[in-house]
Amino acid sequence: MTQSSLLQLARAGNADAIAALMNASLQAIGVSARAVLRDGNLHILLESDRMLAQLPSIEFIQRGISRLGIGWVSSAIVYGRLVGQSSPIWVQRIDLKTSPLVNPFFLEPDVELEATIPPSIGQRLRQLHLPRLEQLSRPEHVKLLHLLLLGVPLFVLFSTTYIWNRYLSGSGVLVPISQTQSATQANLGESAAVEPWNRAMQQAMIAVNLGKTADSPAQWNAAIDQWQRAIKSLQTVPANHPKAAIVPQKLAEYRGYVAQIARDYLSATGLTPVTTITGGLSPKSVVFSGKDLFFAQNMMYSHTINVYNRQFNLVKTISDRVKLADYGYPQFPGAQQGAPVEAAFSPDGNDAWVSNYQMYGATFSSNADDDCSPSGDYSPSFLYRIGTKNLNIDRVVQVGAVPKYVATTPNSRYVLASNWCSWDVSVVDPQQNKEIRRIQLGPYPRGIVVDAKSEKAYVAIMGSYDIAVINLKDFAVDWLRGIGHSPRHLSLDPAGQYLYATLNGEGQVAKIDLRTGAVVNKIVTGNAPRSMVISDNGQFLYVVNYDSDTVSKVRTQDMQVVQTVNTNSAPIGITYDTKTHQVWVACYSGSIQVFQD
């Protein structure tokens, strides 16, 4: 096709011709374009195997399209995406203005790149060092893998969603606009193909833009999430990187922004009731799966686990009745019952591991209590593994006496259970489905938390003032001494810098600096603080106060109680939905209350 014919088609609104003109210039720097024109809006997908800078890309498109003089095209929606990814990393709508009719995209054989792309834009685009994409030399060869419309920062009509799903993704699946922004941010944050410094800068830019328009807790939380992703990217910048010297400065700067948002915009807002779940409930604990399910372990004599979904509907009530012989333990004949206490999920959310205070049935004694020691000859108990797809008990593993708390390591290598009466921790290998080690710790181990790298497990020892630190490589034990009287429950901030402990014997919550092992603050949240959970961004703790019938929201940066709300009687368990920012509170008196934050 001749140059003049291609230009005429582009001016007439032929999207393929417009894309061809773009590709004649953009492919020189490793970028491929595809376009579709519907309802007066031009939709453009820019694709590269390196991160495309949003602002210069938008400026290039805006100038080029306006110069074509397609006056009846009111706007363009531009999508930037990495090759091989299913979702764009950014999306922006731009208004188009008519300019003199020239050819902004077509690259003459004797014209340098700078003659076609404005120098300022060309320089910024080329600074990304984008290699040629030989597989994209012809636009029609671009393979689009079920493109989901994600993350429009300005304004996009519902028809825009339809057009991209209908004409570019090939899926025909509509994605609600309300779901787009967080998904786009997640895609950017998880893209390993982007060099970490550039990725951090892109994430920071998104965080700034989100902050400029945020006017609700959900939007401020989205900004914090993006700052946290930028922080995470900065932490992976190699030591030999040209920008490595200023990484500490940037980390401090970004953490300051997170703290400021939490202090100035999220502390004034707080927990509001959403719903109360009742009926067949006496929950000792409630735990979020990381996906769509919540497991409520009922009082031990109920012998059941209630499973709920995000719509607050009961999905299934699981009985704790098993035949251990069917699971590889022939020494235990007949049928048995357990006594569910706590649960922890595998990192992928596919399996729940549930601790049983004790077992009931032939060969098991039923004299377990909270005042016990290894000399008491208490019967061992079991962990159950429950698949979240079929919600059936599919494995059991024998552990110590009276296991209370259970935790999984982020690398999926171990399941840990604190055994109250045998004064130790069981280390379970889920691949072998057996206990591989016991670690003696002293009277009454309870709460467990594992760091993000799966290197250390922290265990609260309630019969002491101390917290055990287990090295998960060699199982050596170190100690955080003198933390406070009877540490019960533990939470770890996402950065791994601070550990939080409820102190059963003092009625306080302690903040511990793991760099020094020192307690930096203790606060009172109410009478008998029991369990707690930390928000996914690490800015707030939610603490249930058993004897006060309240839940407190605590700002972690300065350990200030910013809100306390009433609950039903005996709040004892708590969990946090990282997607909806909802807090679920298990009340021993017979209900689960859900609060929005």
Image (cartoon, grey):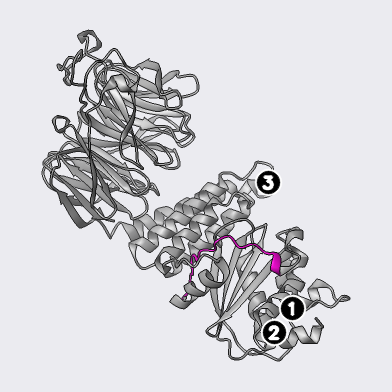
**Dots 1 and 2: beta carbons under 8 Å?**
yes
Q: Earlier in the sequence, mark 3 or mark 2?
A: 2
- Distance between mark 1 and mark 2 Cα atoms: 10 Å
Mark 3, residue position = 241
153 magenta-colored: yes
Residue 226 vs residue 14, the one in the foreground: 14
**Helix, strand or loop at mark 1:** loop
Instruction: Please tell me which residue is depicted at 39% across the width and 61% down the height of the picture.
Output: 220
Specify start and end residues of the magenta stretch as a single range.
140-155
The kind of residue on which mark 3 rests is: His
Residue 536 vs residue 172, the one in the foreground: 172
416 magenta-colored: no
Give the image quarter of residue 1: bottom right
Mark 2, residue position = 10
The kind of residue on which mark 2 rests is: Ala
Q: x%, y% of residue 318?
A: 23, 37
- Distance between mark 3 and mark 2 Cα atoms: 43 Å
Q: x%, y% of residue 2?
A: 82, 83
Give the image quarter of residue 36: bottom right
